[in-house]
Image (cartoon, rainbow, N blue to C red):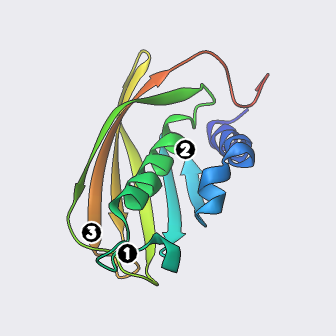
Amino acid sequence: MEALALAKAAAEAMWREDNAARWLGMRIEEVRPGCARLSMPVAQDMVNGHNLCHGGLIFTLADTAFAYACNSYNQRAVAAGCSIEFLAPAYLGEVLTAECSEQVLRGRTGVYDVKVTNQKNELIAVFRGKSATIKGQLVEGA
């Protein structure tokens, strides 16, 4: 199977089981080998006591884009570590987009960077994730 088709098939297989992402209203905008872009609208039940999008939910969006990027080769991968820097607030009604790109992939380890922006393309957060591959594939026999 060609690399782009495999990345999309792996994403579709993950999405079928990704209850959390669907529950939060996330959408897969694009997946290609080593990269993924997902979006999420900031809904009323996502704002905190400051009337801002809860940082944990921004982290979840970034982490989900990271997951789709590092699993795009059809080799199961999980987070081995990650960090986030919050740079600006996100507000009710905004649509956040997390764009993840692979920085390096060596052996079982990958490093990925994610930029989270709002619909005005303002930078909300930056995230770095380190992945580790584990046994198994998302699309068996591909």
Which numbered marker is on residue 52? Answer: none
Identify whether 138 is placed above or below 15: above
What whole-number distance in Å separates the C-alpha atoms at marks 2 and 1?
Answer: 20 Å
The spot of residue 134 in percent (x, y) is 55, 18
- Where residue 22 sits, quadrant-wise, is bottom right
Residue labelled with disc 1: 118
- Side of 106 where 50 appears, left or right: left
Tag 2: residue type?
Tyr
Whether 60 is drawn above or below 48: the answer is: above
Q: Earlier in the sequence, mark 2 or mark 3?
A: 2
Observer able to see residue 55: yes
Q: Is residue 94 left or right of residue 120?
A: right
- Residue in front for this viewpoint, 21 or 6: 21
Q: Residue 109 occupies which quadrant of the picture? A: top left
Depth check: 111 or 82 in front? 82
**Residue marked by disc 2:** 68
Report the disc number at residue 123: 3
Evaluate whether residue 43 shows in this view: no
